[in-house]
Image (tube, helix red, strand yellow):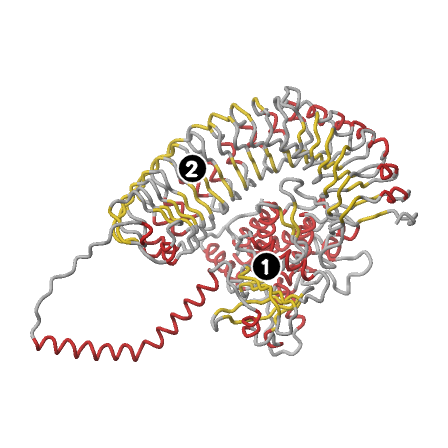
Amino acid sequence: MGNLSSLETLSASENVLEGSVPAVLGELKNLTALGIGGNKLSGTIPSTIYNLSSLTVFSFAVNQLHGNLPQDLGLRFPNLRRLEMWGNQFNGPIPISLSNASKLYFIDLSYNNFSGKVPTYFGGLEYLWLLNLDWNILGSGEPDDMNFLDSLVNCSMLDKMGVVGNQLGGILPNSVGNLSTHLRYFGVGDNQISGDIPSGIGNLVNIEILEMRYNQFEGKIPDEIGMIQKLQQLYLPNNLLSGKIPSSLGNLSLLSQLNLESNRLQETIPPSLGNCSNLILLNLSQNNLSGTIPKQLFRASSLSISLNLARNRLGGPLPSEVASLKNLVELDVSENELSGEIPSSLSSCTDLVNLYMEGNFFQGSIPPAFSSLRGIESFDLSRNNLSGQIPTFFEKFSLKKLNLSFNDFEGEVPTKGIFTNASAISVVGNNKLCGGISKLQLPRCNIKKPRKRKLSLVHIIVISVACTLLGVAMVSSFLFYWLRKKRRTQSSESLLKEPFLKVSYERLLKATDGFSLENLIGMGSFGSVYKGILQDEVIVAVKVLNLQRGGASKSFMAECEALRNIRHRNLVKIITTCSSIDFQGNDFKALVYEFMPNGSLERWLHSSSESDNGQDEPQTLNLHQRINVAIDVASALDYLHNHCEKTIIHCDLKPSNVLLDSDMVAHVGDFGLARYLPELSNPSQSSSLGIRGTIGYAAPECGMGSEVSTKGDVYSYGILLLEMMTGKRPTDNMFEGSLNLHNFASMAFPDRVMEILDPVLTINDEATAAAAAAAAAVAKSNNNRSPGQARNDNRKEECLISMVKIGLACSMESPLDRMDISNAIHELLLVRDILQGTRTSS
């Protein structure tokens, strides 16, 4: 490779290259971009590499490299714009000469062992956009450790600044309020910073993520934080904060995650938090909060990941309004002073997986309505005053932990389901219980037998004959039906609820009728998808990998890894996998998914233009359905990007990978190209150079040797949204040269948008007609209003233009200019409300 004297760009990222970095690369004098991140390279970087003075991109991220970076690095690379060394084992101080590389805009040295002070010269880099020093050993707990923030005031383009996970001490200087107003991410968590949080932090009006957990901040939470209207995630847990929770936080309409856990906060929970209409996680646990739980809190019906109020001094009943949290996965109100009966309305929260209510004063019985909480896995009601019998419907749940100890339950303990596992349940401290499995060591139940009455011979004969005739009639009429229904129920439940159902090649072969063409429902890059019926009852989709295709095995592993720990209503649910051999001895790999009866979004968008036989009625989506699909897909991306343990990038979002269930709810599938990002390393960038995705939907930077990123997914989403509105694929023959789908829509926006729309959207669909009828009825009783149909038409046109606007904002050429997916969801919800007439445009 040293002979390639004209080489300007070398990108070999995200492979499995091993060994040391070859010194011969130092002979490529014309090299301007060097990216070999995401491999298994070890050792040190050869000194010859530092002679490449023309380098603008220097990326060795995510390897096993070690050693010091030369202190004259900035002098050797005066044209350097991008420095990526994160995810290695580099140590020593950060080079002092980086100030000489005045064009630097991107510095990511996170996840290493760099030590010493954070340099103050970063303030001289006027183009600095990202500074990520997370998870090193910078600082020593000294009072002046945070002084470097004073210099960053001069970086007017700073977008992200992170020093999470170091040893920084001192206080947060008041200068933090003078940082760039472009700043969107500010992270100083997991350090030793003390003192008050400066009120000037409210000046950072564009902050979206504020990460300050695990420090020693004290005093009150500044009311001024409520002025940061774009704030989406606020993390202040594990500090020494006191006083009350500011009611001004209720002004943050975009706030999605609020974590104030493990502080010393006092007084009541402000009802204004219920105004945070996008809140999906709220954690106020382990404080000194008192009073009742305000029912207004449950106006935040968007809560889905967790509502955690544990370990406070909250009293009174659990409000029945909790029923509005229908998508909530975890509710924790344990270790408080709550009393009264458990509201049966809690049964409306059918997505609950974890429910913790232990250590309170709840009384009464477990509501029978809880039989609807079939998805629950961990349930703790211990240390309350509950009574009555243990419901037998728990036997049918997929519970992993059930704690009913130290209450006043009575009667017989069930013996099926989770009750067969003594290590998974606890019923100690209930002195009136009996029975159960032997390992529970409960007394045997004393069942009182009814006193026998002597019957005459006539009575005996009559009763015997009647019972015989009735028994024969019932058995002959219903036995077969009952057995068939039981078989169907058992097979369906065992398949869809058993998380790791084992399935063989032979079973899949039979389920798909030998993988016949009649059952073929789709083909992708790495395999084919067949409709199948397992156990003669349950319909599934079976994706069979073509292992002769390069990358198919890697795609299989990527999809298994991505789908293993994620759970969201808008992601395709994987039922099981099969890794075996076929009857010819060849390797066989397949994934089994929940079947989506309404097929792909691709079919609904383009079936009318491709159905020439006239036999099938074309499938179309009205505007209301397209908005709902757009919200569903955006919600799936938001979950993958912002709410998984590790950020997941889909990398191949397109209509054929969006599937619709029987209720027309959209589910994103096909994770064969998905990639992980290290947690909090960099919210919008990865270090994997290379092209990934489908032509037309892949972001422009993917074809220029840049990194896959969450912004790339957003671009694909924007193109998908424009395709939904115009009915045109991005690969349409009309798009040649510089004309593409984005430019096509942009040239028509906003005055001529109606000319480029899918013709289906310009006629009155059923949803629009219904809204018009309702509006007309209102207008009839109010002579000052215009006719309902006219208002509805104007509302529809406004929504159509807004949808195109969102698509354009998400598909901008520059990643920095693209709308965030969480903002897109907010805008789409507004559009839906306007179409339904529940909100007017501002």
Query: Measured along the vertical axis of the image, is residue 614 above or below residue 266?
Result: below
- Looking at the image, which is closer to me, 441 or 673? 441
Q: In the rendered structure, which amino acid carries the disc numbered 2?
A: Ala
181 displayed left or right of 306: right
Q: Are marks 2 and 1 in contact (CB under 8 Å)?
A: no
Q: Residue 134, position in %: x, y?
A: 66, 34
Q: Quick check: 227 left or right of 719?
A: left
Estimate how packed mark 1 is, as few (under 14), some (14 to 19) or many (20 or more) residues with alpha carbons within 10 Å: many
Seen in the picture, residue 180 relative to 571 is either above or below; the reply is above
Report the residue that reaches farthest toward the top: 143
- Which label sits in the foreground, 2 or 1? 2
x and y percentages locating residue 659 in the rendered image: 58, 62
| Image-based side of 787 in relation to 137, left or right | left
Type of the residue with mark 1: Arg
Query: From what the image shows, is residue 493 above or below residue 410?
Result: below
Name the quarter where the C terminus is drawn. Answer: top right
Q: Which residue is mark 1?
A: 626
Query: Taking 266 as reference, is 673 left or right?
Result: right
Assign a secondary structure to mark 2. loop
Q: Which residue is mark 2?
A: 310
Q: Position of residue 122 (x, y in %)?
A: 75, 28
Chain-order first, disc 2 or disc 1: 2
Please tell me whether mark 1 sits on a helix, a strand or a loop: helix
- Residue at 45% x, 50% y: name it: 353
